[in-house]
């Protein structure tokens, strides 16, 4: 394994014991994993760039079945460096090195990485992945545990297979329901005209009235539609001045602290976050009919603003947090009561759990 050769050479160049050099190298690997989980991208001189790509949910036809695949996050590698280089900052912020020590460490490690890749040697980066020859091709293979962490928000979503012939039988049965219904309506209309029991105006009003009653039921469950100029997203305040809920608009960014399968479990985790000064909310969402609940904080107009805020949060409280872009208008809340959330062109009244 090249790891032993690399750590021995690192020990000589930095004037360290071999065991101490091995511990330093493993610590640097852990720092790379933490940086990827937090910011979804990483550039290391001598290696290249690592970044996370999102593959949305998809469907495909396979013979007699339709297959629905859940979304997934994939870790990718590019041998070229992106803008900036993170070795120095990782050594300072995550390994607690001084600026001088960090510069020396980064300059020493880069050529060792570069030589290993050029010679196509097996290189294992603990927790991140490994570089190795697979089927005659030298490439980067992500660590399975890291990919599971990158997809923790989708861990309960499974591939769904629907048999198409069932849908076809359903479609063939549809005309059987429509024809008898049409006959009944036509007969009723003819009887009303022949016997004069209902005028045309009476008939028309009777067909309109049910829709009015439906609209009345809907109005009781939702608030009145707000004018366009008042549909601006904003935190909703309780009488005590503390935000009970937060409206998230498509395109916004939020920091997701953790994800739960049940609403009760999510709310149980709100108190310690709030007591530590983190204004967290429960953000309900669903994927392919499965509902789950995210603990989130903040509402940002850009990824960089969210990333800057994430850096300032206490590491022990938000370990494993990540940044999520809002795909559709939504409302996050933290009190168990009914709240009304105004989003563009619509006001939604729901129970905040």
Image (spheres, helix red, strand yellow):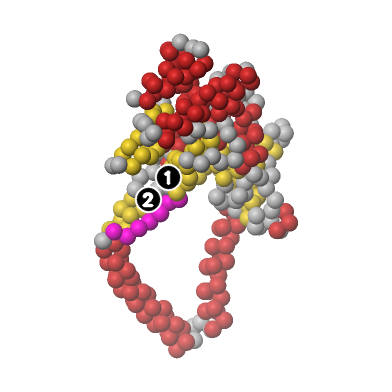
Rendering coords of residue 96 (x, y %): 58, 18
Task: Quadrant for residue 155, please give it.
Answer: top left
Q: Nearer the viewer, mark 2 or mark 1?
A: 1
Cβ atoms under marks 2 and 1 closer than 8 Å: yes
Q: Which residue is mark 2?
A: 69
Rendering coords of residue 197 (x, y %): 49, 83
Rendering coords of residue 160 (x, y %): 33, 50
Magenta range:
56-62
Rendering coords of residue 351 (x, y %): 56, 43
Q: Is residue 134 visible?
A: yes
Give neighbour class at mark 1: few <14, some 14-19, many 20+ (Cα, 10 Å). some
Task: Quadrant for residue 234, please give it.
Answer: top right
Residue depicted at x 36% and y 31%: 121
The dot on residue 72 is: 1
Observer-nearest residue: 295 or 47? Answer: 47
The C terminus appears in which quarter of the rendering? top right
Observer-nearest residue: 326 or 183? Answer: 326
């Amino acid at each position: 394994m090249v790891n032993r050769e690399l750590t021995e050479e690192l020990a000589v160049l930095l004037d360290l014991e071999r065991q101490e050099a091995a511990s330093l190298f493993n610590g640097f690997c852990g720092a790379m994993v933490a940086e990827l989980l937090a910011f979804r991208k990483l550039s290391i001189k001598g290696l290249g760039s690592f970044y996370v790509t999102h593959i949305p949910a998809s469907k495909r036809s396979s013979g007699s079945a339709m297959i629905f695949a859940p979304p997934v996050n994939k870790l990718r590698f590019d041998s070229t460096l992106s803008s900036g280089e993170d070795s120095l900052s990782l050594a300072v912020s995550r390994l607690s090195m001084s600026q001088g020590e960090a510069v020396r460490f980064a300059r020493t490690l880069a050529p060792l990485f570069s030589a290993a890749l050029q010679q196509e040697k097996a290189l294992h980066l603990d927790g991140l992945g490994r570089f190795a020859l697979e089927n005659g091709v030298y490439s980067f293979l992500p660590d399975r545990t890291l990919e599971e962490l990158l997809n923790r928000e989708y861990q309960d979503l499974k591939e769904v297979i629907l048999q198409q012939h069932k849908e076809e039988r359903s479609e063939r049965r549809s005309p059987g329901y429509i024809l008898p219904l049409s006959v009944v309506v036509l007969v009723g209309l003819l009887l009303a005209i022949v016997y004069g029991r209902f005028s045309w105006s009476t008939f028309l009003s009777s067909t309109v009235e049910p829709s009015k009653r439906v609209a009345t039921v809907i109005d009781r469950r939702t608030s009145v539609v707000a004018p366009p100029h008042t549909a601006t997203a904003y935190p909703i305040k309780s009488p005590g001045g503390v935000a009970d809920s937060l409206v998230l608009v498509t395109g916004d960014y939020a920091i997701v602290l953790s994800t739960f399968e049940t609403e009760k479990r999510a709310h149980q985790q709100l108190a310690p976050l709030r007591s530590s000064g983190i204004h967290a909310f429960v953000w309900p969402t669903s994927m392919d009919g499965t509902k789950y609940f995210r603990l989130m904080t903040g509402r940002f107009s850009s990824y960089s603003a969210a990333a800057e805020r994430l850096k300032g949060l206490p590491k022990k409280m938000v370990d494993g947090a990540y940044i999520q872009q809002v795909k559709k208008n939504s409302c996050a809340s933290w009190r168990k009561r009914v709240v009304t959330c105004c989003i563009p062109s619509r006001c939604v009244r729901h129970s905040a759990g």
